[in-house]
Amino acid sequence: MDSVSQIVSSLLAVGRHFDVELEAAAAQHIIGLALPVAMQKLFPKHTHQHIDEMRRVYAEHYHGHPESAPVFAGFPAMFDALRDQGVLLAVATGKNRNGLDRVLAQSGLGDYFTITRSADEANSKPDPLMLQQILQATGIKASDAVMVGDTTFDLQMAQAIAMPRIGVLWGAHSEALLAECDPHALVSTVGELSHALGVMTR
């Protein structure tokens, strides 16, 4: 889902609430981390005493704009094709379980995924625990799986367990940052991603 601007806007709202000047680039860079970890990095002087208030302000702003996180065009068709090939799909996200379930319901994509893991069920990215839980539950080896992500945190968690990984260039982190994680491919369109996954899952 195209949620980068919505997440950045919500983090900037937290900054305004606590009278902390925050650059949009800094907010975008921490996308993918569990929210408490992200807050600690962005607002280290406030997090200990005000984490609950920060979560409230963030959630209030984020959920006030549900229309601003549409599904990227082309993904449902790609998911259909992969599922027809017998490829299992999973989610490993920095969202908490309530947030993940909400967006899966809103997007209509939930039925595509065999298993999902959220940051409150494991450790925040880039710790690979979410991926390890998914692999254990599905009985799939890391070398037979592919992590697709738009942040270095996504690719680093896969890199930590020698899982193949693909970086997409329409999300939170730059091509230069993603390239540092030694991805098997960097793609700039859903078509390129579909081709890369087709090659890797044959």
Image (cartoon, helix red, strand yellow):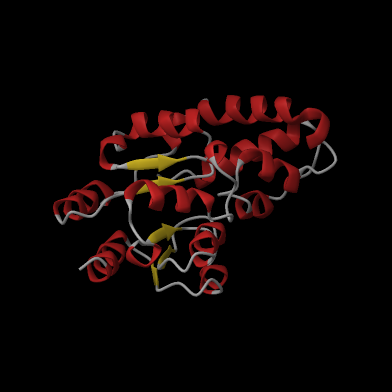
Q: Indicate the position of residue 129 as horizontal and vertical percent values.
A: 53, 51
133 sits to left or right of 191:
right
Q: Is residue 27 above or below residue 184?
A: above
Q: Position of residue 7 (x, y in %)?
A: 56, 41
Q: Quadrant of the N terminus?
A: top left
Q: Is residue 108 left or right of residue 15?
A: left
Dividing the picture into quarters, in which one does residue 120 lie?
top right
Direction right: furthest residue? 45
Q: Nearer the viewer, residue 155 or 56?
A: 155
Give percent across and percent down for residue 18: 79, 32
Q: Residue at x 35, y 61 (%)?
A: 145
For the point 51% across and 67% down, which residue is it?
159
Q: Where is residue 186, by image quadrant?
A: bottom left
Nearer the observer, 56 or 126: 126
Q: Is residue 87 left or right of residue 14?
A: left
Please tell me which residue is depicted at 44% across the width and 63% down the height of the picture.
169
Name the residue: 49% across, 32% down.
97
Relative image position of residue 115 (x, y in whole percent)? 35, 41
Quadrant of the rendered image containing residue 86: bottom left
